[in-house]
Image (cartoon, rainbow, N blue to C red):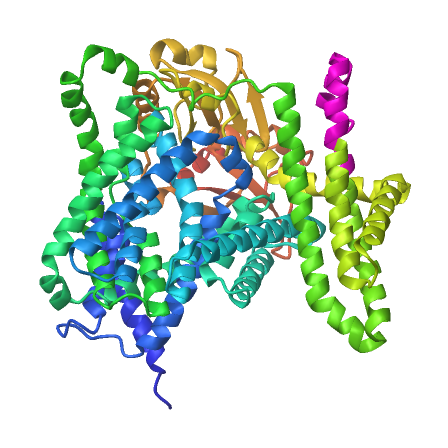
Amino acid sequence: MHGLPPIINDLALILVLAGVVTLLFKRLKQPLILGYIVAGAICGPHLDIFPSVVDVASVSVWADIGVIFLMFTLGLEFSFRKLIKMGPAPMVAACTIIFCMIGLGSIAGRCFGWDHMNSLFLGGMLAMSSTTVIFKALDDMGLRQQKFASSVLGALVVEDILGILLMVILSTMAVSNNLQGDELIHSLLRLGLVLVVWFIVGIFLIPTLLRKVRPLMSNETLLIVSLGLCFLMVALAVSSGYSAAFGAFIMGSILAETIEAEKINAVVSSVKDLFGAIFFVSVGMLVDPAIIAQYWLPILVLVLVIVVGQAVFGTMGFLLSGQPLRVAMQCGFSMSQIGEFAFIIASLGMSLGVTDSFLYPVVVAVSVITTFSTPYMIRLAPVAYTRLERHLPTRLQQVLRNSSPVAAAGNESIWRRLVIALVKQTLVYGVLCIAILALSLTSLLPLARNLLGHWWGNAICGVITFMAMSLFLRAIVMRHNHSDDFRALWQQSIYNRLPLVFTILVRYVIASAFVFYLINYLSPFSSIINWSVAFMLVGAIMMSRRIKVSSKTLEDLFLRNLKSGEIHAQRSGRTAPGYARQLLSRDVHLALVQLPMNSLLAGHTLGELDLSRHAGVMVASIVRGGRRIHIPGGDAVLFPGDRLQIIGTDEDIKGFSERIQAEVTPEVAFADEHDLVLRSIVVSPDSQLCGKAVRHSRLREDYDSMLVGFEDESGQIGLPDADRVIESGDTLWLVCERMVMGKLKGLNRNE
């Protein structure tokens, strides 16, 4: 028998050691990520006390797969629509923190004498807070329902998408080894084009595909299909010059807009946990005690940079986003750590060969220390706020206690809504036209020329490309021309009509420009002729009823796919209603809590519980399965597993959350006497069962037993008929708990 491949032995070592260490960390109530890192350091090549991993290259491949799964599941929790609905506040906070921390980290690196790329990548690593660590800390401390937590989680969502953008920018800088503005702008524009094309095409195709095959989907097939789509996008991203993590995140964000997003997240979770554990163990394997001892001073300085920098710039960012000083300090102090994104950026720098080997273990050591300090920083925020407030002028205190206008969404004018809608539609459909042109002229045109010759190839390519763009060109010109806002402005004043017509003409020219570029690229005619043909073709598109119907169908399909995930999330209570964000500027806010399955509150009506008096909270909605009960009355009964959207202050919501977790039915140990057993009895002539039909025997009510059947002469058991009369000599087979077997003796009076 041949020996096991080294990778099998290595996986056995990694998983067993990771399991033991993480159980210890779970007992100590520390994040599991730290346990994985410690396990990696123990089995890594730098410690000779324990057995070490042999096939490091294969483990690295598994770790790369772990990064893909981490970014894929991160994308599943992300939603572009959700990001837009958050408004500008999380964007302001996240951008302030990231830009300031990148600058501060780069300055720190230069102060240590590190080169430009090391310092730049260091700034990127220090800029991203750990979503995993913060989630865990807030959960452990019972703070997830507090008002500041929603602001932190909103900023983390923005940080995640900006982290993807940061990885692309750092990759571009690493490859070009310079900071030329034109090249960077070109890369960002190309990235934006790729993002929009992939997202729009994905929303058109993937939800439709999943909807068609939904009757065939089991958990197994859903897992295979979703992972297949993930790795397909990974391959496309790498072939386009981007990282595998970028492709995984994009596919996750596309699937996040589908109804199956929550189910996909559930079936992928176990696989992600496995490969994610291997990734974090591989991070720990790079920890070199010698390097940590050598760079102990930079490690301590970087810890201070993160703790102080995030506390200061985080507070400033949330203040600028509209939060009062107390909430802003709670948010800023909560984000004072680095985690998984720092490791991914460090891996990126090493794979590109632009960072030195010492930087990875230094960042890991900094992450470990800041992760341990996170709960203490969260507890420190109220204390720091109280002390700071004592030294602030009274006038400044009043200003900082109120939200700024950024936090609240104001009413938009009709003109502003219409212009924003027109700009959005022109950008989206324009990007699709650019994508069709690029794909056609780079792939279809050479193929057509090889098969049909130069001019015939040009003609066929031009016709196909024009037909493909026609649906989107019509949408650019005609969409929103009959909307409520457009008609309201048209009827409101005669002076509005000329600007409205001008918007149509501008979009007509933009659509014609795409057609002109295509004709001008493929034909030998002059620009005047090409412009004239372009204008006529766009006019023909606008007059075509078939193109109108096809364009409307395509648009309806896109909007249906885009909104399906959000509608499903609202029905299931996974997203807060629109008014929740407006409450954030008040003392109260909305939170979602779930009744445990063994809750003592279940079975009672809201009127009986009187939560507004006894708990200080009001129930705005009850989410039960796919049903949502808005503004439930006092006669609404609570059921186990109900999700309640409640409104209250931080203290009241926290108290109610603790109450529903405490008021539960205590678990009873299952003893042998509760085992179900099968027993037979022979009915005696003087039995109280004689002459009674089965339905009137009261075996369930009086004897806690269930009649299985009657035994016939051959020893077989026949199922009982409710109307059959029990007679003397019948053999009854009953199922009951062992502890009530004594009751059965009373069925025959002579026993």
Would you say residue 500 sits in the magenta stretch? Answer: yes
**Residue 743, percent across and down?**
42, 34
Q: From this view, report whether residue 112 is shown above or below residue 260.
A: below
Which image quadrant for residue 292? bottom left
Q: In the figure, is residue 300 to the left or right of 451?
A: left
Whether residue 148 sits left or right of residue 82 in the image: it is left
* Quadrant in the rendering for residue 732: top right
Task: Name the residue: 33% across, 30% down.
Answer: 318
- Tell me the quadrant of the picture where the N terminus can be found: bottom left
Predominant SS along the magenta part: helix
Q: How many marks?
A: 0
Q: Is residue 660 above or below residue 508?
A: above
Q: Which image quarter holds the C terminus?
A: top left
| Between 638 and 746, the one nearer to me in the picture | 638
Whole-percent x, y for residue 453 in the image: 83, 76
Which segment is the magenta one? 477-503
Q: Residue at x 25, y 39 (%)?
A: 310
Q: Could you tell me if residue 535 is visible in this image?
A: yes
Q: Is residue 248 visible?
A: no
User: In front here: 331 or 443?
Assistant: 443
Q: Nearer the viewer, residue 387 or 112?
A: 112
Occupied quadrant, residue 273: bottom left
Residue at 31% x, 78% y: name it: 55
The extreme top residue here reads: 613
Instruction: Name the residue nearer the viewer: 487 or 221.
Output: 487
